[in-house]
Image (tube, helix red, strand yellow):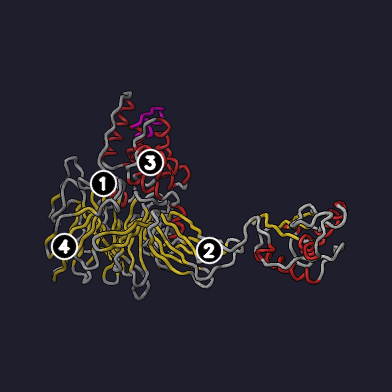
């Protein structure tokens, strides 16, 4: 079990296993319970495994077996036993549904994890973790969008045991480690037979390039745990975490657990003068300090009563040697899970570790913008900082872009290792979205310059409006997770409207096309003779050849059909009444064929866009029927061609 995990487990309330077993099994379970309640999870699971391997199953046993692996970051085996609990019981507690989902995610079984989270949301939708999942079902895409903003750098000061909690101090790093130095023996604690944690100073800028760790003074380090330090700007004040041990007095809570407390060290001529902070309590843990950039607010993690989850983040004001009353950072930050290890950057961002916000598995590092006394949206910082394992104690110098964090991911030197990184592009810490597009003619698809574009809410209230550019383009800034409508219009045109709802995804850009139709555009059933003011398409008497003057008019039809590429035309050819009906029907059919052939051959119009036939003298426009004496001009009106729009 890693040192970091030990610290986290001091936030966990003890559970008790009650069941009816055989005598031998009962002894093993009792032994396991004792180890479990002392946070000796490795020993506890060995006892539970003996019972489970004998074939015994109960919900309590499977819960504890899963927990014994979960709390030591063995998510593969945690998923195995939580899965057995899931199959065994029809009514799995919501907390175990969440731990099962998180363990599956740490094993990159994202689809299976999502199915369990859907069940958690249905069973306990008020669980903030379930709500976060429901609102961020595309979380892998959003994490991918945030990923790739840091480049990891190798460092040389990790040990074979546990190193974490880096803190910047006068150009060096202060870290927590349980490494051994030289041949001196060190006390070990019972739960994993490893040395207690101490605070070390690492000279990262030595002339010879060696990064060696030197233990801080005995005024800071004791025979118990010290960890997670933060320093004032002048370096003369530090806050750090220690077991509940002060002035040679070791204290436990009512259950016999030694909790964590915060201490302050002030530099004097003789070294560090250490005092306990007044809001500590023997019955719960207060740990992992962070300072605001002005040094007047202390942030920390605690499992004090009234919190939302296993550990929450709090703040307290500092006024000289006095401290205010701790305040929770609230629901936007805290979940039913673990929020811990805060860090405040000089550009007013808060970084923290959480397994309650949506991540890749285990603890992930998250970031939020600080705004006055409040906080903005919380975002996962993405890979490579985050992994399927536990990633925590993130710090960064936002001026240089250099930072550090700790992780128990595979490939490290010890249990927990510190990793360095360089920021290669800024994190997205505010949801910044736009909607862009272009206003085009519905029929021609050509851009319409200077169209009016309006951004509205779903109630048609205008939010913003603009005039599109010469190329018909427009852009509006929009908020995340909101509904909008965009409407385009112009004089002598209709309007088009697109409605949409944005997501919580960072830096999303929407592209839409608004297609508006000219009120002067032809409609189905219109005859191009009137639309285009065509002169009559004349044919010589009893002839079907396209005359030169007719060709000029047909080129106008060609131009129209190229402007409106979706339009289809039905060509209708007519004759006058002179000659027999049969002859005139044949003549009009030949004239129709020649007209269509001209449009195809000389106009380049696709054949499938043209239909037609000859009507002979069946649809005369005047009285000049058979046997009626008419002037030539009246007969000419009947020798006509029509170009009827049948499809837009």
Magenta-drawn segment: 47-59
Q: CA distance from mark 3 to mark 2?
A: 48 Å
Q: Quadrant of the C terminus?
A: bottom right
CA gap, disc 3 to disc 1? 17 Å
Asked whether residue 338 is drawn in magenta, I would say no
Q: Is residue 191 left or right of residue 409?
A: left
- Most extreme residue toward the front is 629
Q: Which residue is mark 4?
A: 318
Q: Main secondary structure of the magenta part?
A: helix
- Callout 2: 10 Å neighbours few (<14), some, many (20+)? some
Asked if the residue at tag 4 contacts the one at tag 1, i.e. Cβ–Cβ closer than 8 Å, the answer is no
Residues 368 and 35: in front is 368
Residue placed at 87% from the left, 51% from the top?
582
Task: For marks 2 and 4, give the CA distance.
Answer: 65 Å
> Up-down: is 312 above or below 16?
below
Of callouts 3 and 1, the N-terminal one: 3
**Relative image position of residue 48 (x, y in whole percent):** 35, 34
Q: CA distance from mark 1 to mark 2?
A: 57 Å
Residue that mark 2 sits on: 493
User: Disc 1 on helix, strand or loop?
Assistant: loop
- Residue underneath mark 1: 308
Tell me which numbered mark, 2 or 4, is placed earlier along the sequence: 4
On screen, residue 291 versus residue 570, left or right, reads left
**Residue, far bottom:** 207
* Distance CA(mark 1)–CA(mark 4): 24 Å
Q: Report which residue position mark 3 lands on.
A: 121
Locate residue 83, reporting x and y percent. 42, 37
Q: How many marks?
A: 4
Query: Do callouts 3 and 1 mark residues in contact (Cβ within 8 Å)?
Result: no
- Closer to the chain start, of discs 1 and 4, is 1
User: Which of 620/289 is in front?
Assistant: 620
Q: Residues within 10 Å of mark 1 (few under 14, many from 20)?
A: many
């Amino acid at each position: 079990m890693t040192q970091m995990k030990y610290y986290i487990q001091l936030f966990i309330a003890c559970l008790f296993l009650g069941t009816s077993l055989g005598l031998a099994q009962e002894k093993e379970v009792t032994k396991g319970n004792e180890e479990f309640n002392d946070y000796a999870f490795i020993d506890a699971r060995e006892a539970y495994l003996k019972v489970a391997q004998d074939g015994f199953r109960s919900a309590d046993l499977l819960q504890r077996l899963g927990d014994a692996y979960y709390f030591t970051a063995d998510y593969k085996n945690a998923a195995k036993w939580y899965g057995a609990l899931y199959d065994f019981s029809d009514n799995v507690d919501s907390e175990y549904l969440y731990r099962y989902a998180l363990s599956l995610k740490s094993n990159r079984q994202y689809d299976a994890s999502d199915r369990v989270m859907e069940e958690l949301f249905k069973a306990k939708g008020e669980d903030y973790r379930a709500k976060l999942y429901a609102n961020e079902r595309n979380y892998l895409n959003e994490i991918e969008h945030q990923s790739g903003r840091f480049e990891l750098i190798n460092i040389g000061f990790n040990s074979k045991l546990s190193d974490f909690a880096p803190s910047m101090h006068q150009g060096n790093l202060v870290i927590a480690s349980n490494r051994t130095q030289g041949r001196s023996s060190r006390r070990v604690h019972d739960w994993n037979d490893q040395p207690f944690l101490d605070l070390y100073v690492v000279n990262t800028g030595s002339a010879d390039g060696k990064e060696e760790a030197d233990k801080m003074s005995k005024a800071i380090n004791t025979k118990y745990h010290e960890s997670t330090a933060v320093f004032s700007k002048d370096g003369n004040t530090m806050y750090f975490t220690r077991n509940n041990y002060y002035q040679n007095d070791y204290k436990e809570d009512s259950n016999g657990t030694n909790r964590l407390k915060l201490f302050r060290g002030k530099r004097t001529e003789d070294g560090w003068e250490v005092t306990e902070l007044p809001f500590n309590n023997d019955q719960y843990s207060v740990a992992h300090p962070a300072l605001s950039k002005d040094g007047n607010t202390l942030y920390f993690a605690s499992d004090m009563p009234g919190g939302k989850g296993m550990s929450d983040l709090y703040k307290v004001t500092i006024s000289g040697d006095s401290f205010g009353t701790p305040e929770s950072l609230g629901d936007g930050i805290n979940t039913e899970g673990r929020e811990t290890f805060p860090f405040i950057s000089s550009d007013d961002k808060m970084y923290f570790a959480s397994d309650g916000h949506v991540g890749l598995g285990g603890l992930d590092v998250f970031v939020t913008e600080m705004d006055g006394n409040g906080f903005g949206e919380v975002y996962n910082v993405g890979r490579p900082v985050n992994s399927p394992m536990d990633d925590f104690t993130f710090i960064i110098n936002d001026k240089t872009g250099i930072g550090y964090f700790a992780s128990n991911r595979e490939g490290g030197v010890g249990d927990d290792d510190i990793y360095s990184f360089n920021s290669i592009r800024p994190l997205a810490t505010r949801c910044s979205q736009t909607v862009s597009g272009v206003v085009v003619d519905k029929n021609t698809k050509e851009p319409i310059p200077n169209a009016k574009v309006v951004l509205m809410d779903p109630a048609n209230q205008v939010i913003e409006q603009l005039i599109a550019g010469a190329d018909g383009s427009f852009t509006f800034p929009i908020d995340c997770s909101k509904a909008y409508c965009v409407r385009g219009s112009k004089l002598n045109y209709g309007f088009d409207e697109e409605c949409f709802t944005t997501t919580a995804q960072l830096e999303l850009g929407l592209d839409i096309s608004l297609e508006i139709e000219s009120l002067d555009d032809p409609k189905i059933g219109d005859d191009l003779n009137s639309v285009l003011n065509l002169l009559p398409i004349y044919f010589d008497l009893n002839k079907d050849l396209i005359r030169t003057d007719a060709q000029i008019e047909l080129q106008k039809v060609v131009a129209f059909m190229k402007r409106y590429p979706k339009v289809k035309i039905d060509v209708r050819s007519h004759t006058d009444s002179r000659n027999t009906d049969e002859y005139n029907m044949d003549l009009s059919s030949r004239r129709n064929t020649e007209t269509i052939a001209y449009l195809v051959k000389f106009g380049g119009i696709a054949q499938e866009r043209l239909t037609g036939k000859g009507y002979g003298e069946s649809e005369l426009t005047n009285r000049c029927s058979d046997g009626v004496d008419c002037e030539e001009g009246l007969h000419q009106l009947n020798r006509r061609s029509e170009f009827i729009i049948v499809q837009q």
